[in-house]
């Protein structure tokens, strides 16, 4: 039996015409295709497109379940989940608190202010990914920096659905590599977005229908990844990645200009 309770996402989609709904599906499909080629997070690409068709608050909620569902297998892969959780406790605590604060900020913002904030954070995320800053943390700094960057990543998640860049910088600087990096990133993302959804739900801003719709948004994302798989070896990944990030920067600038003109 499908959920019927109305929430802010389901009511927004219900009021849209078929062309706008098709545009939302296309944005998710494109996000999945880009992830399938260069592994850049779906929200980074989909958010600036979705924000042209729906409010940022609803776009953040729509993108939440695809991120959770995409990361749960990686979070559980290889076992030692509790040991890994203890190792990354500082950023985990930071993300929980950051999402509680971030959702409160997002809900309180006027729509045009939310769009401007999301655009600015998207631009920051794209710039960080282009610059790829790398440094090594001394052991004594791993936990405090982990908490701060976890908190900051959660704010970026709550307002623009893009926690990845700050988390990647932290994990690399703390020495995580290969499968350990993937597992730790996935675990932090799952905890972060579960907290985000609970914060939305506790404030009566998200219904069961919203969560069902968000889960359904995973379908075009996965389809996009499968469609793009044959292209992965045919396109130069580094060049394509730069093109995508330049698009994100341009789209983020457009979001800010649109919000300032509101």
Image: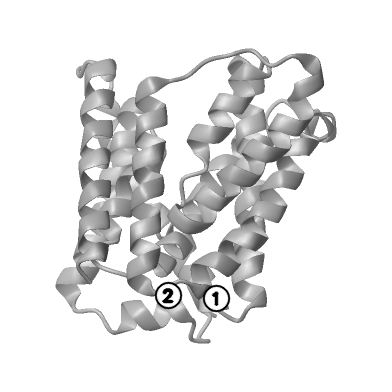
Give the percent coordinates (x, y) of residue 91. Answer: 71, 38
- Residue at mark 2: 9
Give the percent coordinates (x, y) of residue 127. Answer: 36, 31
Q: Is residue 82 above or below residue 160?
A: above
Quarter of the image with the N terminus in it: bottom right
Looking at this view, is 121 or 74 the one in front?
A: 121
Taking the view exactly as shown, the residue that stands out farthest to the left is 19
Nearest to N terminus: mark 1 or mark 2: 2
Which of the 4 image quadrants contains residue 237? Answer: top left
- Residue at mark 1: 206
Left or right of 259 in this view: 215: right
Give the percent coordinates (x, y) of residue 205. Answer: 55, 78
Give the percent coordinates (x, y) of residue 219. Answer: 38, 54
- Label pair 1/2, CB-CB below 8 angstroms: yes
Residue 228, disc: none
Which of the 4 image quadrants contains residue 100? Answer: bottom right
- 10 Å crowding of disc 1: few (<14), some (14-19), many (20+): many
Looking at this view, is 215 or 241 the one in front?
A: 241
C-alpha gap between disc 1 and disc 2: 7 Å
- 10 Å crowding of disc 2: few (<14), some (14-19), many (20+): many
């Amino acid at each position: 039996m499908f959920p019927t309770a109305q929430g802010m996402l389901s009511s927004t989609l219900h009021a849209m015409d078929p062309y706008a709904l098709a545009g939302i599906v296309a944005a998710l499909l494109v996000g999945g295709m880009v992830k399938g080629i260069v592994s850049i997070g779906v929200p980074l690409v989909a958010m600036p497109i979705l924000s042209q068709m729906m409010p940022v608050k609803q776009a953040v909620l729509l993108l939440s379940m695809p991120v959770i569902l995409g990361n749960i297998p990686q979070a559980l892969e290889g076992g030692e989940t509790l040991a890994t959780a203890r190792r990354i406790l500082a950023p985990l605590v930071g993300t929980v608190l950051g999402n509680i604060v971030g959702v409160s900020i997002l809900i309180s913002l006027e729509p045009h202010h939310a769009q401007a904030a999301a655009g600015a954070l998207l631009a920051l995320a794209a710039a960080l990914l282009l610059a790829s800053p790398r440094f090594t943390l001394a052991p004594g700094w791993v936990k405090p920096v982990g908490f701060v960057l976890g908190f900051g990543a959660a704010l970026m998640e709550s307002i623009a659905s893009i926690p990845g860049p700050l988390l990647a910088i932290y994990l690399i600087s703390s020495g995580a590599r290969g499968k350990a990096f993937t597992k730790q990133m996935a675990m932090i993302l799952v905890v972060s977005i579960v907290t985000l959804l609970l914060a939305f739900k506790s404030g009566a801003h998200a219904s069961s229908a919203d969560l069902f719709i968000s889960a359904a948004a995973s379908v075009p994302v996965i389809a996009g990844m499968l469609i793009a798989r044959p292209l992965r070896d045919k396109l130069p990944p580094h060049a394509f990645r730069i093109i995508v990030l330049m698009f994100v920067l341009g789209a983020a600038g457009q979001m800010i200009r649109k919000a300032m003109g509101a």
